[in-house]
Amino acid sequence: MADVLQMQYIPTVKKDANINIRIERELKANVEKILQNLGISTSQAIQIYFSQILNHSGLPFEMRIPNNTTMNTLQNTDDRKNLHQFPNKEELLKDLDL
């Protein structure tokens, strides 16, 4: 027997607030292509995003600030400190015990 998708009518809530944003043209176009394939509008996608922020009491994905070790490593790399150089891939793999 085939699965049946049941849809429930949910009354719409009056939408009386506007959001105006500026965004890169290429990003907007690429996202709109994806949303079109999903069958939803940009407004619907933003509504979903806001609902998920509300449901999660924050962003619906993880955002992290790097820990001190990572921050120090990034800074050292930028400063070109404590860098390890290898003459070839084999030496690098050997140093990593791989």
Image: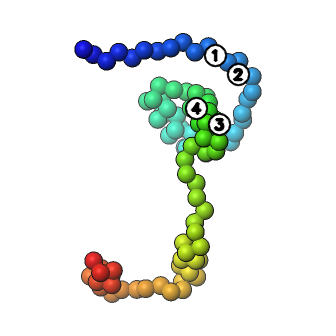
Are the residues at dot 2 and dot 3 in contact (C-beta closer than 8 Å)? Answer: no
Please tell me in which quadrant of the rendered image residue 57 appears.
Answer: top right
Q: Around disc 3, counting alpha carbons within 10 Å, would you say few (fewer than 14), some (14 to 19), or many (20 or more)?
A: few
User: Could you give the CA–CA distance between mark 1 and mark 2, rounded to whole angstroms?
Assistant: 8 Å
The quarter of the rendered structure image containing the C terminus is bottom left
Considering the numbered disc 3 on the image, is that residue within a helix, a strand or a loop?
Answer: helix
**Label 2 – label 3 distance at C-alpha:** 16 Å
Contact? badges 4 and 2 (CB < 8 Å): no
Give the residue type that dot 2 points to.
Answer: Lys
Q: Is residue 42 above or below residue 84?
A: above
Q: Which residue type carries mark 4?
A: Ile
The local secondary structure at tag 4 comes to helix
The kind of secondary structure element at disc 1 is loop
> Which residue is the site of mark 3?
54
Q: Nearer the viewer, mark 2 or mark 3?
A: 3
Q: Residue furthest right?
A: 17
* 89 is higher (above) or lower (below) than 8: below
Task: Name the kind of residue labelled 1 in the image.
Answer: Thr
- Residue under numbered circle 4: 48
Q: Which mark is residue 15?
A: 2
> Which structural element holds mark 2?
loop
Q: Are marks 1 and 2 in contact (CB under 8 Å)?
A: yes
- Residue mark closest to the camera, 1 vs 2: 1
Between the residue at mark 4 and the residue at mark 3, the CA separation in whole angstroms equals 10 Å
The answer to whether residue 86 is left or right of residue 67 is left
Query: Residue 51 placed where, x, y %?
Result: 62, 33
Q: Residue at x 55, y 47 (%)?
A: 61
Up-down relation of residue 73 to residue 91 (above or below):
above
Which residue lies most toward the left here? Answer: 1
Identity of the residue drawn at 54% across and 72% down:
70
Q: Position of residue 47 (x, y in %)?
A: 62, 30
